[in-house]
Image (tube, rainbow, N blue to C red):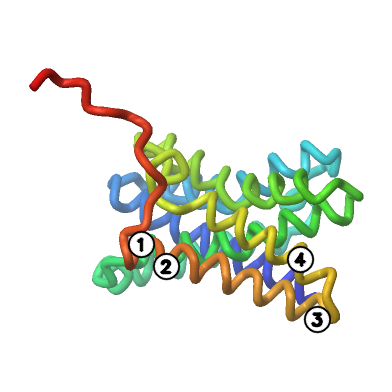
Amino acid sequence: MFYFVCDLLGTIAFAISGVLVAMDKKLDLFGVFIIAFVTAVGGGSLRDMLIGETPVSWMRESAYTITIIGSVIFAVLLQQRLKYLRRSLFLFDTIGIGLYTMVGIDKGLDAGLIPFICIALGVMTASFGGILRDILCNEIPVIFRKEIYATACILGGVIYLALLNTTLEEEYAYALAIIIVIAIRLLAVRFHIALPNIYRNNAKE
């Protein structure tokens, strides 16, 4: 139940982030719902297909669709308040990647995959929905920019797997790793920490 609740919380966070982007692009209600839906289940759907768990989660469990619909209604009704909070999109996106990273890693562990692949599944679960959201809304996906995004997921995943080999209870390790991913992302943005730019200015002096 604990892991299912975390999964639903991640669904809510990503659905709302999708709504905020869609409304910023001034899409109609149908467009808003589609972007929210794709953002919320895109990563999990790809993960499930790769590990052969089909039909994918949201097709087997109606709670995901109901949660997304509720999140869309909530975000649309409170859009003015959410827009007033300048960092709403960033906040919900950050919460979403923290929750979904661990959900993806646990799915990999349940499938008996090696740690490296489990972390890759966690990053995929956390980021692919946002990639689809940004592409559909004609934006460069956050994960492909300089910002610390996938790196936070990877570090959190490594720490989670390490904690599983300690005496710490699994639920506490799970929750702590989620907090670590969120904290890394928040601190990176707060202190302007970014990956180095590989492009050099070749302009003539």
Spatial CA span between label 4 and label 1: 26 Å
Residue at 69% x, 59% y: name it: 158
| Nearer to me, 59 or 144 | 144
Distance between mark 1 and mark 2 Cα atoms: 5 Å
Q: Quadrant of residue 169?
A: bottom right
Q: Secondary structure at mark 3?
A: loop
Question: Is residue 86 placed above or below 54 in the rendered structure?
Answer: below
On residue 189, which mark appears?
1
In the drawing, what numbered circle is on residue 162? 4
Q: Which mark is residue 168?
A: 3
| Quadrant for the C terminus in the image | top left
Residue type at tag 3: Leu
What residue is at 89 percent from the left and 49 percent from the top? 111
Mark 1 and mark 3 lie on one chain; the one further toward the N terminus is 3
What mark, if any, has residue 186 been given in the picture? 2
SS of the residue under disc 2: helix
**Label 4 sits on what residue type?**
Ala
